[in-house]
Image (spheres, rainbow, N blue to C red):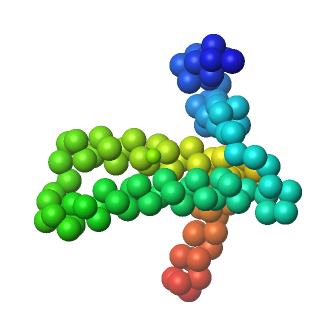
Amino acid sequence: MIDHLRNLANGWESTPIHLRYEAFVHLTNIQPYDPVLPGLGELLELQAELGEVTEIYQKLRRNGRYLEAADKKKLKDELGDVLWAFQALCKVHHFSLESLMQENMEKLCARLAEKES
Ligand SMILES: [Mg+2]
């Protein structure tokens, strides 16, 4: 299993990274399937990871500090966790990252076009 995960992470460079990442998240997601509310475990994970991002900002603000290199490293790490949980939630509902990106851009373009008209 770990060799397969490492190949997804570092190998098969001819396969687009978003496809390798989707497979990686699918294989590493250990949330139990909830037949009543599919994706609830993944949503809770996403919210928890977003809370960790919020905590970084909250502590900086509370202590009157600016974002320094170590904070930025931690922020990047936590945003990676947010991405993992987001992808896990998308996977439950069979939403590909590619389709989400495409449809979101189209929605925003339509919204902006409406504002301009
Ligand atoms: Mg985290």
Q: How many numbered discs, if any?
A: 0
Q: Is residue 110 left or right of residue 59?
A: right
What residue is drawn where x is 56% and y is 24%? 9
Where residue 6 sits, quadrant-wise, is top right
- 10 or 114: nearer the eye? 10
Residue at the right extreme?
A: 35
With respect to residue 87, does 48 lie above or below?
Answer: below
Assign the C terminus to one quadrant of the image.
Answer: bottom right
Q: Is residue 7 left or right of residue 69?
A: right
Counting from the top left corner in percent of width and height, residue 102 is at 65, 55
With respect to residue 89, does 16 lie above or below?
Answer: above
- 7 or 55: nearer the eye? 55
Residue at the front extreme?
A: 32
Q: Is residue 112 left or right of residue 70?
A: right
- 23 or 42: nearer the eye? 42
Assign the N terminus to one quadrant of the image.
Answer: top right
Q: Is residue 2 left or right of residue 37?
A: left
Visible in this render: residue 102?
no
Residue at the top extreme?
A: 3
Visible in this render: residue 54?
yes
Counting from the top left corner in percent of width and height, residue 12 is at 62, 17
What residue is drawn where x is 53% and y is 84%? 115
Where residue 69 sits, quadrant-wise, is top left
What residue is drawn where x is 51% and y is 82%? 116
What residue is drawn where x is 13% and y is 65%? 64
With respect to residue 110, does 8 lie above or below?
Answer: above
Counting from the top left corner in percent of width and height, residue 61 is at 21, 66
